[in-house]
Amino acid sequence: MRIIEAEPAQGASAEATERPPRRDGAHSRPLPEPDRRSTLRLVLEDGGPGFCQFALNNACNARCGFCGFALDKLPRKDWHYVEREGALEAIDILYRQAVRYLVLTGGEPMLHPDLLEIVQRASGLGMKVLLVTNAGLLKPHRIRELAAGGLSSFIISIDAADADTHERNRGLPGVCDRIREANAVIDELGLHSTASVTMSRLVDYEALPDFLKSLGFKAVTFSYPLTKLDSNFLSFSDSDLVNYSDAELLQAFGQVKALKKRFQVVNPTASLEEMERFVRGQEQRFPCLGGFQYFYLDWHLDLWRCHNWDQPMCHIKDFDGSQRVRDGCTKCMIDCYRDSSVMQHVGVSAHDAYQSFKRGNLHEGANALIRKGNLGSVHSVLEQLPWLLKF
């Protein structure tokens, strides 16, 4: 059975955006025992609530010039969709390991036939569930369905500051009208969406705020340009669109920081400055928490410390917390890991201090409380508080 809910991308046949059939019927897997710890307890005992980027599939219906998941780059024979029961079990395991934020991504996750049930499972455990989408399949009835299932927020990809450029890069004609319609429904339901803009040569930073407002967005997060990843996550490309010189990249970061005066930018200023240090080869102040607090789970249910690592940590069924790694890595500039690490830096310092005090090591605990970067981390949390409180 074929389920096709979006117009095919330009030059693509309907067959190219075919999804596996939806499987109806509620699952019978019992929910794990609820973890009734407060956020403060999670901070002190685990370093805070964790998040996982869960790629439900690698199939996509778009043709983005800076992404290896693109419809005309990844052969259809190599498409994979996570199996439903495995996905539900994986969510339970992540929950038991203090993961409280689940980011559903792909490919294009709305191609997955069991998306709603996956959302329901995670939200039923009290997780905050975010959906990353190109909006090609984001029809009003799907939005209402996902909202009723407990979805917390939508993150919608935008590539440029005008509809023609965006739709041409995506290969999704008319998608801006769909985004505008979707944001109206999202707002009506009391939810919110965030525009996700890859820093590329397509972006006119000066014109971007007005275009985002015209589409119904009130906030934007920028994805830092990636030309290589060592995992199986293909959201990168050695394309001229994102292949910047260091000077060009530093200029782009400056333009993003300047936008904060005109529009809500979710990337913390401290993180943008950290990325500038990364480009310059300077000492980093905020080690990444990928593999310790943040994870990437793929469609095969292999768990990775992040998108950039070359080997998975383990299969999700084997994840018991002993595989966690914390080695101060600063090898990449993947925004979803580096931005979050800046904001959670102070929480992990509080965790380290608490654990040291419990062991009677007062000197070590005091050092954790005055650790370099703590004040910058607090400032980042306060800077992003209006966006964070929407969850």
Image (spheres, helix red, strand yellow):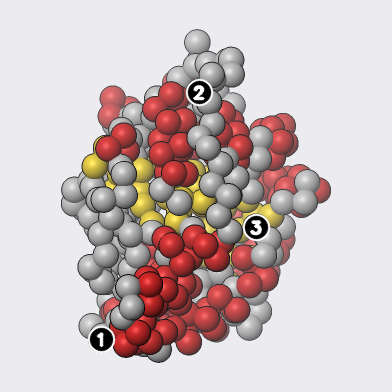
- Residue drawn at point x = 38 percent, y = 59 percent: 293
Q: Name the residue under label 3.
A: 391
Element class at badge 2: loop
**Residue wearing tag 2:** 29
Q: Position of residue 371 (x, y in %)?
A: 37, 86
Whichever of labels 2 and 3 marks the residue nearer the N terminus, that label is 2
What quarter of the picture does the C terminus occupy?
A: bottom right
What x and y, as percent, mark residue 227? 27, 60
**Residue located farthest toward the right when viewing the structure as drawn:** 188
Question: To which residue does mark 1 refer?
Answer: 282
Identity of the residue drawn at 53% across and 26% down? 30
Q: Mark 2, mark 3: which one is toward the viewer?
A: 2
The residue sitting at 32% across, 87% down in the picture is: 363
Q: Could you tell me which residue is drawn at 18 percent across and 51 percent down?
A: 310
Tags 2 and 3 touching, CB below 8 Å = no
The amino acid type found where label 1 is placed reads Gln
Q: Callout 2 environment at 10 Å: few (<14), some (14 to 19), or many (20+)?
A: few
Q: Which amino acid does label 3 sit on?
A: Phe
Q: Which amino acid type is marked by label 2?
A: Arg
